[in-house]
């Protein structure tokens, strides 16, 4: 059977309210008795009910009479932990328990409970942050005190220093770091060590290579076997020979070219690039073709190897000069050795486009000689 609690209004089944603990108003007695109805001839069986609130005497199908209410019946009393004043007190003196009871018993509206909870959350956060700051300060102060104690221990002649007295600590000056050497300073240091020249001469050589001749990367390699005071250098992958005399630069050479004669620059880096033999094999083939176009028995020609003695080659810009010899039959069938000097202009090396400029085979000359220094 379902009941509605008289105190809290909760609908429930059973002998007492599960929320407030109050018993339901009607409790059955152990005995059921049948009594005759004094007013009617037909007899009915009724139950005699006894409750802690009111008493019912007789029940018939036609009439219900109730006795007066028992107003002295005990009412449900809230526990202390459910009372508002106690929960407010806990929120003041021990808020964790107060918060739990506040939410459990719903003593305030939801919005009010939320605001109170947020307030204490902010308080907890502030206390935690303040505690961390205090610990950091305390650790620093402790470190300073320890420093003072160690200083007093290491110096027994001094009077004991009170750790409570604030002391001023000076920050040690940083160890000075060496300034790295510049590119020029590294060059000078290496040249003076290997060539045995002064720093001034090594500095002049640096300026000559980098600032006046246009090289980008220069390094001393070793002592050369071509002279007493001559040293091999690498300048942008070109092999140069530098000669020193009386602690001064005597000359700078590349192959058989003089780049610097001790007084002035004859050929700089651009001049070196113009004189590099890009493809010696092709230049030699061009010279052979020109020779065969200018002799009477081209099919009988025999040439020495490119690296043979007596064969030379030179270039300046687009003009290439080749000098050497060949053997060929004359009109009488005898093999005769002839010497030649040929110059030609190369327009496109990849496409094999070139043009003869000067041809000299023995005493026969065609064209105009161009000086290739």
Image: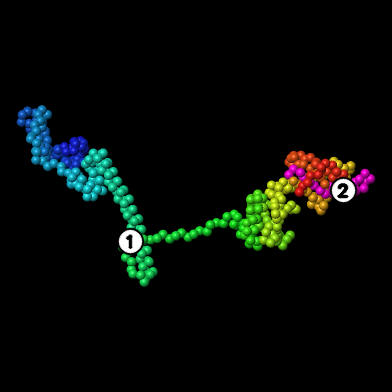
Residue 178 horizontal/vertical position (percent): 52, 59
Q: Is residue 224 placed above or below 349 in the rendered structure?
A: below
Per the image, label 1 sits on a secondary structure element best described as loop
For the point 31% across and 48% down, the residue is: 125
Alpha carbon of mark 2 to alpha carbon of mark 1: how far?
105 Å
> Is any atom of residue 57 visible in this view?
no
- The crowd level at tag 1 (other Cα within 10 Å; few <14, some 14-19, many 20+) is few
Q: Earlier in the sequence, mark 2 or mark 1?
A: 1
Which image quarter holds the N terminus?
A: top left
Q: What residue is pinned by disc 1?
A: 166
Q: Is residue 285 placed above or below 3 in the rendered structure?
A: below
Quarter-of-image position of residue 297 = top right
- The crowd level at tag 2 (other Cα within 10 Å; few <14, some 14-19, many 20+) is few
Q: Which residue appears farthest toward the left when viewing the image?
A: 38
The stretch in magenta equals: 317-340
Residue 211 horizontal/vertical position (percent): 63, 50
Residue 351 horizontal/vertical position (percent): 74, 39
Checking the image for residue 338, the label placed there is 2
For residue 321: magenta?
yes
For the point 73% across and 53% down, the residue is: 258
Which of 128 and 291 lies nearest the eye of the viewer? 291
Q: Is residue 254 placed above or below 102 in the rendered structure?
A: below
């Amino acid at each position: 059977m379902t009941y509605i609690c008289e105190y809290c209004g909760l609908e429930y089944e059973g002998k007492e309210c599960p929320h407030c603990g109050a018993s339901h108003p009607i409790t059955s007695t152990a005995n059921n008795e049948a009594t005759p109805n004094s007013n009617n001839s037909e007899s009915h069986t009724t139950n005699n009910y006894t409750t802690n609130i009111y008493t019912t005497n007789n029940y018939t199908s036609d009439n219900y009479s109730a006795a007066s209410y028992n107003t002295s019946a005990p009412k449900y009393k809230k526990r202390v932990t459910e009372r508002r004043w106690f929960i407010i007190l806990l929120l003041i003196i021990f808020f964790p328990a107060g918060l739990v009871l506040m939410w459990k018993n719903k003593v305030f509206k939801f919005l009010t409970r939320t605001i109170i909870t947020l307030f204490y959350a902010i308080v907890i956060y502030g206390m935690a942050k303040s505690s961390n700051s205090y610990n950091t300060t305390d650790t620093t102060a402790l470190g300073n005190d320890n420093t003072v104690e160690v200083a007093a221990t290491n110096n027994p002649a001094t009077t004991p220093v009170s750790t409570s007295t604030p002391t001023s600590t000076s920050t040690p000056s940083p160890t000075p770091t060496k300034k790295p050497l510049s590119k020029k300073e590294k060059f000078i240091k290496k040249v003076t060590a290997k060539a045995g020249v002064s720093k001034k001469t090594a500095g002049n050589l640096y300026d000559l290579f980098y600032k006046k001749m246009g090289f980008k990367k220069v390094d001393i390699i070793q002592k050369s076997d071509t002279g007493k005071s001559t040293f091999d250098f690498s300048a942008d992958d070109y092999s140069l020979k530098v000669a020193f005399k009386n602690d001064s630069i005597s000359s700078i050479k590349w192959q058989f070219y003089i780049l610097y004669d001790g007084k002035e620059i004859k050929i700089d880096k651009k001049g070196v690039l113009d004189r590099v033999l890009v493809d010696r094999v092709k230049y030699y083939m061009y010279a052979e073709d020109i020779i065969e176009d200018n002799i009477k028995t081209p099919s009988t020609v025999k040439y020495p190897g490119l690296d043979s003695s007596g064969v030379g080659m030179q270039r300046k810009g687009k003009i290439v000069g080749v000098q050497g010899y060949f053997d060929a039959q004359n009109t009488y069938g005898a093999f005769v050795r002839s010497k030649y000097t040929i110059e030609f202009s190369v327009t496109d090396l990849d496409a094999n486009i070139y043009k003869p400029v000067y041809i000299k085979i023995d005493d026969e000359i065609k064209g105009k000689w161009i000086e290739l220094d």
